[in-house]
Amino acid sequence: IALTVGIAASLINATVGILYGSISGYIGGRVDNIMMRIVDILYSVPLTLVVILIMVRFEERGLQTILLAIGLTYWIGMARLVRGQIMALKNEEYVLAARTLGASDKRILMKHLIPNALGPIVINLTMSIPSAIFTESFLAFIGIGLAPPLASLGTLCYDALGGYQIHPHMLLAPAGVLCIMMLAFNFLGDGLRDALDPKMRR
């Protein structure tokens, strides 16, 4: 469940963030200012608090609910990253050539700008998976995550608190798995950054 939530929520965040950030960065001007002010307002609110409020609002706490809660909030960082990449690339010569040849804005975004910004996007996507896994485990640990009979690493840690002095392995096992997964995805993100960033390769 932790891996499902982490990967699925990160894909939702990436989809929303890429669409929002690319539109904002490509159009620019007043539209960009309005869209980024919305992002700034959302960014000023603690995202974990927003996720908790969304989870409390829904009576049925299933996998879809937690994916919706995380997916509606954690796209902000991706949107900022994509916007910066698009603004840096949209005045490149190949983009101007495509525009001169009559390519539509949609084609320029999908065929030229977003593919050339995929390096930082993939790195950010990989780094967001541990954050989603930790958020889901935290919500389950405080009792507002997945409802029984579904179990996650957070619920296993919570259930083990009562007898951890007698049976410490019941707490150490899920906590250890959680730590290993988060470290693994962080190392994967570092490796992708080194592989995709020309400056890091040099």
Image: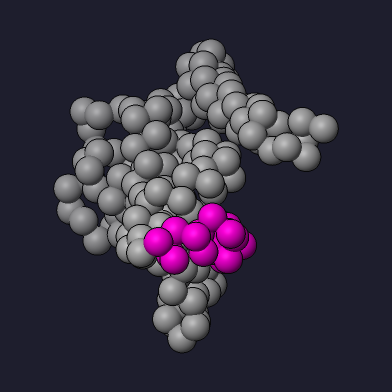
The image shows residue 9 at horizontal and vertical percentages of 37, 43
Residue 39 in sight: no
User: Where does the C terminus fall, quadrant-wise?
Assistant: top right
> Is 104 placed left or right of 162 in the picture?
left
- Dividing the picture into quadrants, the one containing residue 198 is top right
Q: What segment is highlighted magenta in the picture?
A: 81-101
Q: How many marks?
A: 0
Residue in view at x 40 percent, y 48 percent: 111
**Residue 110 colored in magenta in the image:** no
Relative to 169, residue 154 above or below: below
The image shows residue 29 at horizontal and vertical percentages of 49, 83
Relative to 20, residue 177 above or below: above
Question: Residue reaching furthest front?
Answer: 101
Residue in view at x 34 percent, y 30 percent: 4
Residue 67 in sight: yes
User: Where does the N terminus fall, quadrant-wise?
Assistant: top left
The image shows residue 183 at horizontal and vertical percentages of 62, 27
* Magenta segment main secondary structure: helix
> Is 116 placed left or right of 103 in the picture?
right
